[in-house]
Amino acid sequence: MKAPTPEEVTALVRDAVDSCEGRHAIAWLQCIQARLGYIPQEAIEAIAGRLGVPAATVYGVATFYHQFRFTPPGKHHVRVCTGTACHIRGGQSILDEWRRRLGIREGEVTADRRYSLESVACVGCCALAPVCVVGETVHGRMTPNTVGDLLTRYALEDEREERGGE
Amino acid sequence: MANEAFERRAAEARRQWSLERSGDPPLVLVGTATCGRSAGALATLAAIREEAARRSIDLRIVEVGCLGHCYAEPLVVVYARGAEPVCYSRVTPGIGTAIVRRHVAGGEPVVEHLLGALGPSELFPSLADLPRYGGETRKLLARAGLIEPTRLVDALANGTWSGLARALDLGPERVIEEVRRAGLRGLGGAGFPTWRKWSAARAAPADVRYVVCNADEGDPGAFMDRTLLESDPHRVLEGMAIAAFAVGAVEGFVYVRAEYPLAARRVREAIEIATREGILGERLLGVGPPFRIQVDEGAGAFVCGESSALLYSLEGKRGMPRVRPPRSVERGLWGRPTVLNNVKTFAAAATVLAEGADAWASVGTGTSRGTAIFALAGKVVGTGLVEVPLGTTLRQIVFQIGGGVPRGRRFKAALIGGPSGGCLPEATLDLPVDFDSLAAAGGMLGSGGLIVLDEDDCMVEVARYFLEFTQRESCGKCTFCRIGTRHMLDLLRRITEGNGSLEDLDRLETLAEEVRDGSLCNLGATAPNPVRTTLRWFRDEYVAHVTEKRCPAKVCRALIRFRIDPDRCAKGCEICVRSCPVQCIDNDPHTRKKIIDPERCVRCGACQAACPPEYDAVARLSPRDTPAPGESRREGGTP
């Protein structure tokens, strides 16, 4: 995937900040993340300007909450559940395996921007533990080995998509 | 009067509801709450729709919430002509198609996939006969999974909003008196008497008051608030409206966790419908004072389950708790008196007003009246939600209703209340679970998360896991919580890695007390609970870690190794080799049996899980230098 140019980012941010006007900083940030997938530096400054508070205040709010990301997510955003039920059923091994396969840690994106990794506290599917979520799809009863299967599957899907696009 | 007009409306709804459930046309309910979806309910739903369309059957298909039987998802309920309503479990798309073909069109229930009949039945076992269902007392979950969550007809036909109608007739003071007589206490875990909160907010001098619903279910292992909001949102809104009427608030907020998008969506939809139908909004039920509700989504911070932090977060600020008093009922949201209750408490308040205080007070024990919902997960057969009278024993919940520990393993402990709670060992199984007995045993009812551990779980590791969670979630305001939990986590890491000493155990105990006493809010004050309770009941496991470098449950990776028993290994089988994520399993050149290279092994356990049970050749050994029976020192000596 190609990264957008700085000019494109600036235009996207301006557009998102304009259309997201929220009751307060959290609502505003949530709206921007829903549109852009992350919170760019420019957005924080723009929101601070509109709210009439220092950028540090908005930055303080944004970094306090786990929901906000400051880097764009990959094409496939992988969230590994680290809730209690998943943990006692081997969730750590699943997270380790994603790290090993992708060569990144939580909060990072692969160099080709295809995958990003995150750990989350409970997605509420405790009966299917251990669980990970790729994009919007929940994959239950994971084993370290099925991480590889999923990667193959998404790689095939991407390949098909790219071929179809040509 | 509010009651007469309302009663006409409810009677009409009941008529329509029973007509819909006559089986003509047939009615199919598919549970599509989050848990059902993750088990594939949406694919099942699509298959049922497709098959009905293909056969051009006049069929009403409704998406409902969750029955609480997560282990049996996806669940489908069928009302068809000529047969009593039944519930199917583990309905894959293929089974869904078969249900339409054989049951709906053919009139013959698909018996092999039946969970049970909804009501009493001559032909099939009834759901009430199943210990997992019949052992429960459902008050708050009574409608979950059986009604269309946001539809008003379904709500009215099942008694929702009738509590508000009664409240409007009683007047604010008698509403609070009714809640007092019911003995309702905060079901978010703290157990504070609800009526006291309400009467304090009513008495506080102010022009504006607020009602806030805490749906920031932060315990990573509890999901009953989510289920209630996804399955029966009108009942929760009704409770908020009753509270608002009692304290004189005109505005309310539902603060939903960001990780629960479906719950937020269904609550918003229910608010919109109730407002459109004149139940909420300008005049409650068309006759009462105004009350509007809006939904705010949290942004992922465990500490925001704490009252003052939650209110700051609603204001758009960092969610950091403040010194109390003043309490939220005096100075809460934007400095105004605020009633902040948990999802379950509001649902219970509505139940109390609808069914009367006596009905609620008639179940429960001592000063803990009514029911509580537990989210049963971990090493237990019947995972899901369980609603029982307060005072039910842990043994009844885990073994009688939950079906016990799977695969014949031995029960070790139950983790109750998540990161703020503690562990309860086998010796406490007959303890009645209520607010006061749990506090006495060093635990806390808390969130109602109930995770069962068996002999394969390490208590030190579990304590480390919870500390890692609370340490990460500490907001950083209080030094003892910010730095103390970090020190405790470092000690626990050291112990699980085999580098701990006996003095570390004493240090943990001292720190646990200091963190508890030196923290402003309950996040810090209860963070040491998992450590304190595991040290109290399972000190021998800690000692084994530090003195023998041995993990008795063979979990802590630094203290174990995996070995394939050559006598059990079936040489032709390659399952473990293919399961290994790091390719560390080789063939012995002579015997073709498999050997694990301990240098490359990451000790994930995948080979052990993959090895077919008839061979069961992979073993865990701890400490790492333990020679296996029949193994030479040379082969085993790789610490």
Image (cartoon, coloured by chain):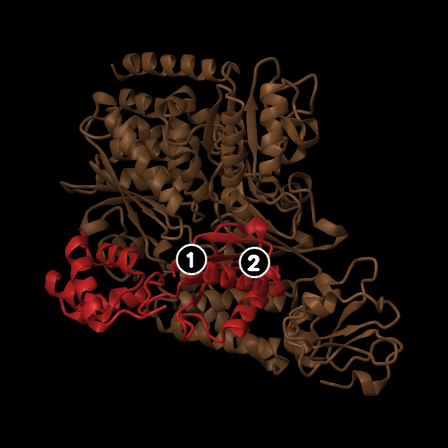
Chain colours: A red, B brown
Q: Dot 1 corresponds to which residue?
A: A164
Q: Quadrant of the C terminus of chain B?
A: bottom right
Nearer to us in this view, A36 or B401: A36
For label 2, the SS is helix
Q: Quadrant of the N terminus of chain B?
A: top left
The chain carrying label 2 is A
Residue B462: percent from left, percent from top: 58, 64
Which residue is at the far front?
A166
For label 1, the SS is helix
Q: Residue at x 87, y 80 (%)?
A: B590
Residue B554: percent from left, percent from top: 70, 69
Residue B263: percent from left, percent from top: 39, 43
Q: Please, is residue B487 above or below residue B2 in the view?
A: below
Q: Residues within 10 Å of mark 1 (few under 14, many from 20)?
A: few
Q: Please, is residue B414 above or below residue B277 in the view?
A: below
Task: Residue B173: name its quadrant.
Answer: top left
Q: Please, is residue A4 above or below residue B139 in the view?
A: below
Between disc 1 and disc 2, whose residue precedes? 2
Q: Dot 2 corresponds to which residue?
A: A86
Q: Residue at x 22, y 50 (%)?
A: B333
Nearer to us in this view, B528 or B510: B528
The chain carrying label 1 is A
Say which amino acid is labelled 2: Cys
Say which amino acid is labelled 1: Gly
Q: Residue at x 66, y 30 (%)?
A: B114
Residue B111: percent from left, percent from top: 69, 27
Instruction: Say if mark 1 contacts mark 2, CB within 8 Å.
Output: no
